[in-house]
Amino acid sequence: MFTGIVKGRARVADIQRNQGLYSIRLAFPSGFDDGLELGASVAVDGVCLTVTQHTPGHAKFDVMQESLARTTLIDLTLDDEVNVERAARDGAEIGGHPLSGHVDCTAEIIGIDTPENNKVMQFQLPAEWARYVFAKGYIAVNGCSLTVSDMARDTHRFAVWFIPETLRATTFDDKRVGDRVNIEIERATQVTVDTIRGYLDERLGPLLPRLEALLNADGQSLEQLASRALPNKDASRS
């Protein structure tokens, strides 16, 4: 498990591209890998990877085909920087929200604004994942626990504000419009939405599309109804 609080930026020192398997060697910031052992888990841009080789300041990871197909790791090149976080220890403070390191999809950065001392990014989600994202809810972007500031359900777009500390500690200040990022949906939200949709489908059957149409006509959605069943969220790191 991870906390979504990025502990530093690592540099891609080497990539070996084999059929269906990439081996990536990262150079870590000072002290990041103290006590790191073979088999340990590290979140790399939000993707849980296993250490296969370790020398002081460096570690190697094998990335299988499924991860390459689902995440942005397939796009990495030499000297790229990635967000990294060690697996949480027992009793660790959860400063963000619990993450598994299992990426659900990628999103595209479609807009960047820079109000004074802040940065705002807009992201385009695949439609099938947008139902799990709500304003003021949690989301993990490249392994960083963030709070959604706005969600446009009709266009499947959401926005996040970044404070200077987050920009300093992560790679987001280097991102540009058109870049892809890894997305992990907050699991409690996903379970709640899927449970409510399953219950309504079981109860209403063929009437469910009519309910959705009525809600849409009124500017609402099943997802918005489900969000009212979610616990109140405190602001996470942004």
Image (cartoon, rainbow, N blue to C red):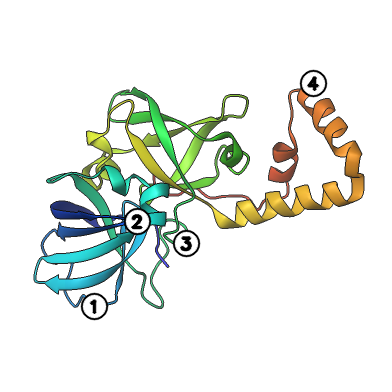
Position in image of residue 117 (x %, y %): 27, 30
* Residue 38 tag number: 1
Camera-side residue: 13 or 65?
Answer: 65
Callout 1: few (<14), some (14-19), or many (20+) C-alpha neighbours within 10 Å? few
Which element type, helix, strand or loop, lies under badge 4? helix
Q: Which mark is residue 98?
A: 3
Mark 3: which amino acid? Answer: Pro
Q: Earlier in the sequence, mark 3 or mark 2?
A: 2
Q: Earlier in the sequence, mark 2 or mark 1?
A: 2
Residue 200 position (above or below residue 216): below
First in sequence: mark 3 vs mark 4: 3
The quadrant holding residue 207 is top right
Q: Amino acid at mark 2?
A: Ile
> Considering the image in quadrants, where does the C terminus appear?
top left
Estimate the spatial distance between the alpha carbons at disc 3 and disc 4, rounded to whole Å. Answer: 36 Å
List x then y, in percent, for residue 49.
Answer: 32, 64
Of callouts 3 and 1, the N-terminal one = 1
